[in-house]
Amino acid sequence: DAGVIQSPRHEVTEMGQEVTLRCKPISGHDYLFWYRQTMMRGLELLIYFNNNVPIDDSGMPEDRFSAKMPNASFSTLKIQPSEPRDSAVYFCASSFQTGGTDTQYFGPGTRLTVL
Amino acid sequence: GQNIDQPTEMTATEGAIVQINCTYQTSGFNGLFWYQQHAGEAPTFLSYNVLDGLEEKGRFSSFLSRSKGYSYLLLKELQMKDSASYLCAVRLYNNNDMRFGAGTRLTVKP
């Protein structure tokens, strides 16, 4: 399996621009998570989906952030408009729930820099 | 809110043993995970505990006490490649919703 795939790996944009991050989960996984990681705040859960349905978006910082999962193999995280404080590494992770040792598998991340 | 606390940084010597502690106060508990994250890379799964006691996996062991809200990760025979951040994470419910600690950055010195 190719693992969780994220694109782009690096994104540099200017304040006010729209940014779209993409994620392809591991085939067969029914949970998808979006995280943001910064030195100051560590790894923060933004939103997660189960069977393509958003379950908990309480971690989404504000209305500028939105996420969609139109099908089982694709999800996007959009920031519009972007701000310098959004600069971080954004990780997508997926998992298959059996309630046991199943864990989340992380993609390589997208390093976002907003100038 | 969910509180998961770990030391920010630790340093140890190659070949030695190091213990990284994690304490948690969360609204639910359905397992505790440890992840390793090398600089610039994604977190990768190391260990899982859901019952009290010690789980051993080669050079790595993890311990859990649910009544104390406490876990530790024990790394033996440290190698230079073990220099990384170690993240403690609590699965809140039976749905893989996990919350992470800020991570402990371990530096292994020769």
Image (cartoon, coloured by chain):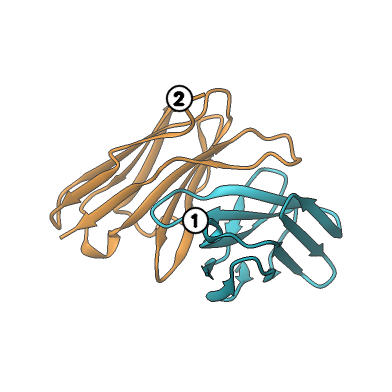
Chain colours: A orange, B cyan
Q: In the image, residue B23 lies at what x, y percent?
A: 69, 72
Q: Is residue B11 above or below residue B37?
A: below
From the image, tell me which residue sits under label 1.
A58
Question: Could you classify mark 2 by the number of other residues whose Cα lies within 10 Å: few (under 14), some (14-19), or many (20 or more)?
Answer: some
Which residue type does callout 2 highlight?
Ser
SS state under label 2: loop
Quadrant that contains the N terminus of chain B: bottom right
| Chain letter, disc 1 residue | A
From the image, tell me which residue sits under label 2.
A73
Residue in the picture at 81% in, 53% down: B55
Total numbered circles? 2
Residue in the picture at 63% in, 33% down: A96
Q: In the image, residue B39 lies at what x, y percent?
A: 42, 57
Q: In the image, residue B13 lies at what x, y percent?
A: 59, 72
Q: Is residue A1 left or right of residue A13?
A: right
Q: Quadrant of residue B25?
A: bottom right
| For marks 1 and 2 on the same chain, the one whose residue lies earlier in the sequence | 1
Q: In the image, residue B86 lies at what x, y percent?
A: 57, 61
